Image: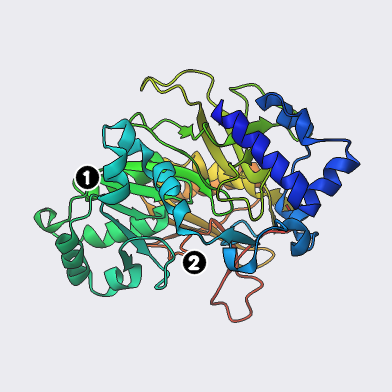
Amino acid sequence: MWQLRELKNLAALAYAHVPFYKKIWQENDIHPLQIRTISDIQKFPITTKKIFRQVSFADLINDEASVNEYTWYHTSGSAGEPFRFPTARDDRFQYPNIFYKYRFLLWLGVTPRYLAESLKVVHITENPVSSVPGPTLPWQFVRTDPERALQRLAEYSPEIIEARPAVLFDVASTVRKLRRLKRPYFRFIYSYGEMLTPELRGFIEDTFGGGELYDLYGLAEVGGVGVECREHNGFHLNEESFVVEIVDDNGYALQPGNFGRVIVTPPPSRHYIMPFIRYDTGDTGMIMPDPCPCGLFARRLVVQGRGGGIFSIKGKKYYHGELRFALGKLSSLMYRYQLVKISDEKAELRIVPTAEYTQNSARHLQRIFEEGFGFEPEIKVLDTIPVAKNEKMQIIVDQSRDTLGIHGSSYFEGG
């Protein structure tokens, strides 16, 4: 079994060449030879960003790797926890990542050779110096000169346009200003890195001529964990390589159909520099109990989002997950939203409304917050909400700490 072989190889590598893992496993009387089945991974301790930050990099890195074999990467920190880690710089790992990202095309009949050699993708990014392979289009270019930017897209004729949902929304909002006949059509649209609501999906697909949007679940630290199939109902896990678990707050495994912490163990191929074994993603998710109508055997993961972090107002504290869950239930009224702390007593809910939003919706939103959380945010209806420098939509922002009142920061305490 490929998955079990990969897991055994990863554990053996970590024990022999990564001091951190050898130390904590010996302390817990654990040895890689104890892995005989996939479920044996549950004997090993869960790791987190917090734990890794407390360990020197020398103890986290494979002692056989030279400094020329890896480069340093930073996560966005959109969940309040920026994280720096080493990753292999070898180009030979590009192709496995392509198959993880775009394997929905394989399920639709595209050949692996075409995927590796001929697929035309354009990445729209806020970062003018992007590390992603293939052509990139700066979002600032789309914003300032949309007609020329769309001309560039037409000249390249990509099969896939790719960006974070927040950026895709901004691009779609710009394109909507053009007559429908002048709008670009993309066969596929690809999103990653943020929660995607049904309303936002529909808005983006309709704008780009009905092109089909596929969403990916992954993390910068470990890569693509799962991607949607044509049913668009959960992420089919890359189970030939990744081990994905759902556990409760005490680390015990949960059965499919129950929400819990999402724990991932990626394959050793790209992660031989710094292995991630039983890594807590910080996300809350569930393995769907029923088989997918598409016929694929790989399990499906549903993700609710980050559960950590605390929002403080009027002397009370609320978990970010509570607020996000409440906002998610109201997604039919909002394409995008952002809860902003203005002061210790005042908050704003900034929204980009859907067609269902009416004059009574503002009061409805305020009443839900008053009844559920004890405060009423001021509702501000906007045409757009700017993305952060990391290209992500910051759902919760604290501007009370910003003395200039200009740049809010992602607001988390602990978590």
Q: Which residue is mark 1?
A: 187
What percent of the width, then of the height, locates residue 192? 44, 49
Query: In the shown orientation, is residue 28 left or right of residue 87?
Result: right
What percent of the width, then of the height, locates residue 302? 52, 33
| Cα–Cα gap, marks 2 and 1 | 28 Å
Between residue 22 and residue 388, name the one nearer to us.
Answer: 22
What percent of the width, then of the height, locates residue 370? 61, 47
**Residue under the image location 45 percent in, 64 percent down:** 387
Between residue 108 and residue 113, name the one nearer to us.
Answer: 113
Disc on res. 388:
2
- Please tell me how many numbered marks the rendered image carries: 2
**Residue under the image location 52 percent in, 45 percent down:** 327
Query: In the shown orientation, is residue 296 left or right of residue 338?
Result: left
Between residue 93 and residue 301, name the one nearer to us.
Answer: 93
On the image, which quarter does residue 45 sit in? top right
On the image, which quarter does residue 188 sit in? top left
Contact between labelled residues 1 and 2, with CB atoms less than 8 Å apart? no
Q: Residues within 10 Å of mark 2 (few under 14, many from 20)?
A: some
Name the amino acid type tagged 2. Answer: Ala
